[in-house]
Every structure is written in structure tokens, then in C-alpha cells.
Amino acid sequence: MTERQAMAWVVACALMWSTGGVLSRFFHTTEGFEVTFWRSVFAALTVLVWLAVRGERSPLRQLRAGGGTVWASGLMWAVMFTCFMFSLSLTTVANVLITQSLAPVFTALLAGLVLRRPVAGRTWLAIIVAAAGICLMYVFDLSSLEGPHALGVLVALGIPVAGAINWILLQRAGTSMDLTSSVLLGAVLSSALTLPMAWPLGVSLHDLGLLAVLGVFQLGIPCILVMRAAARLAAAKTSLLALLEVVFGIALTWLFGGETPSWATVAGGLAVLAALAYNEVGQSRRPAAAA
């Protein structure tokens, strides 16, 4: 897989992830723990089918072979899976996605501390521009942080923190280790964690169908793909590309979920896109100049 292909995969994953917010607005239930449980169950089944179709060795053998890296990555996936759906049950899609978009900042800082690899100035500038766009959206378009909204944003903070740690783990593992089983582990941990709080289960068939779609196409498949793509990219770049989920998510919720974005949301989204374009143009010019 080339770097260009890996980038395209991450963008496709961001698009698939972004459908979670709009689809969640069609649930009949607002019970966050039960929604999280079922989505994680279907994601786990998706990874199991993937491994079986590819003829991979058993997940247990992969977990043993991967050691602490696989377990740490699985724990981070579990945090992200759980925090995402639970926070959506407490506050708006924009609140969750905007909070989630702090991941590139955390990733860039961790890359310098853990990997001892300085982040390029161009990437830092792109992160700052993207963060400015996010702040514009945050200041003018974030719902009042009172009651459940404040709790929802607090829960959503777990997503960028866990995401940053996960990108660093993927960067360190590189192509020498298959971490697909960590997605399975994360889904199983998320299911086990939320089942006691979701019991007794009472989801309707309508919601169960939506949750199956979420578990397979919004969570399982993109997480499998990003595990392979992220191994080819710098952690900060992967995290920056994943910011497109914010733009896609707010656009989809506006078109199909009944949440109309303000001018600040539109302007902030354009700033994120501009930052990504600037970072990519700078990357493409470096090899040309060297040649």
C-alpha cells in the first residue's frame, strides 16, 4: 500500500465514521449504554468474520502474539467506542465531534514525547489552523454547556485522548504487527463494560437494525481498514486526516438529521479542509523538490 492509498483509506474511514451521529438521531431509544453495547457487539462480529474470511490465525493467538501493544490498543478502542455513543445520548452531534477533533493536538504532542520524532512545522501550522476552525465552531455553535450537555462533552473528551494514544501505538508497531485483533478486543471490552448497565435489554427491532448498520459499516469495517492504513502514515497525519469526520458528520447531520449548522460551523469546517489541503500540498512538494 502506498502513502497515497493509505491517505485515501483514512479519508474513506472518516466518511464512514461520520455516519454515526446522523444515524443515532433516528433511534427510538436514548439509552446510551444499550446503544453502545449493541453497536460494539456487531462490530466484534464484523471483525470475527473479517478474520475468518482472510484465513487469519485465531484472535486469541493474535492477542498473545501482539503482547502489550495489542491489549493497550484494544483498551483505547474500547474507550473510544463507549465514550462516543454514550456522549451522543447526552448532547448534540456537533458537541461530540468538535470535542473529538482535539485528537491531532494530543497526537502531535505524544509523537514528540513518545516517538522522539519532531512534528513538521507545516503539520503544526495545519493543526493550528484546524484548531482555530474548531474553536470558531465551538465558541459560536456549541450548545449551552449545562446539565447533560456538559457531561456529554466531558465524556467525549475520552475520544481524542484515547485516539491519540492509539495512533501512537499504531505508529510504533508499523507494518511488523497486525493489530486488527485489537479492534475485536476493544469491541468485546466495550460490550462487557456496558452490558451490566444496559440490562435488561429492551431495544426495538427498528433500533437493532440501525445498530447493526452502525456496528458493521460505521465501526467494524472502517476500524479494520484504518489499522492497515495508519501503519503507513505518520501518527499526526493520520489524526489530522481523521478530522474530516467532524466536517462530514456535521454536514450529514445537517442534511439528514435536523441539526442546522450556523455560519460559524460552516466557516470552521472550511478551515479544517484548508488545513488538510495545505498539509498535503506541502507533503507532495517535498519529494518533487528533492527530485
Image (cartoon, grey):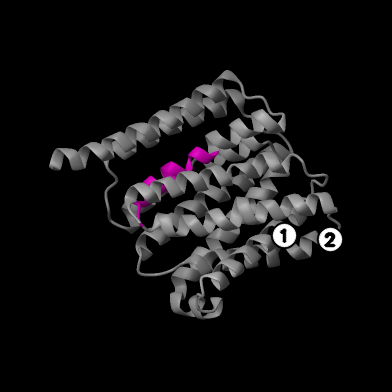
Residue at the image point whose x is 45% and y is 49% from the top: 9
Residue at the image point whose x is 66% and y is 56% from the top: 215
Looking at the image, residue 173 sits to the left or right of residue 165; the answer is left
Residue 79 placement (x, y as % from top left): 59, 57
Looking at the image, residue 233 sits to the left or right of residue 205; the answer is left
Residue 192 placement (x, y as % from top left): 69, 67
Q: How many marks?
A: 2
Q: Does any portion of residue 54 appear in the rendered image?
A: yes
Q: Is label 2 in contact with label 1 (beta carbons under 8 Å)?
A: yes
Residue 253 placement (x, y as % from top left): 65, 33
Q: Is residue 44 magenta?
A: no
Q: Which residue is mark 1?
A: 37
Q: Is residue 235 magenta?
A: yes
Label ID, residue 201: 2
Q: Magenta part of the protein: which range?
A: 232-245
Q: Toward which corner of the image does residue 51 lie, by quadrant?
A: bottom right
Quadrant in which the C terminus appears: top left
Q: Amino acid at mark 1?
A: Phe
Label ID, residue 94: none
Q: Does any portion of residue 98 appear in the rendered image?
A: no
Closer to the camera in the image, 157 or 51? 51
Label 2 to label 1: alpha-carbon separation: 10 Å
Mark with earlier residue (2, 1): 1
Residue 211 placement (x, y as % from top left): 72, 53
Closer to the camera in the image, 286 or 239? 286
Q: Amino acid at mark 2?
A: Leu
Q: Toward which corner of the image does residue 178 lie, by quadrant?
A: bottom left
Vertical position of residue 272 compared to residue 54: above or below: above
Residue at the image point whose x is 58% and y is 54% from the top: 80
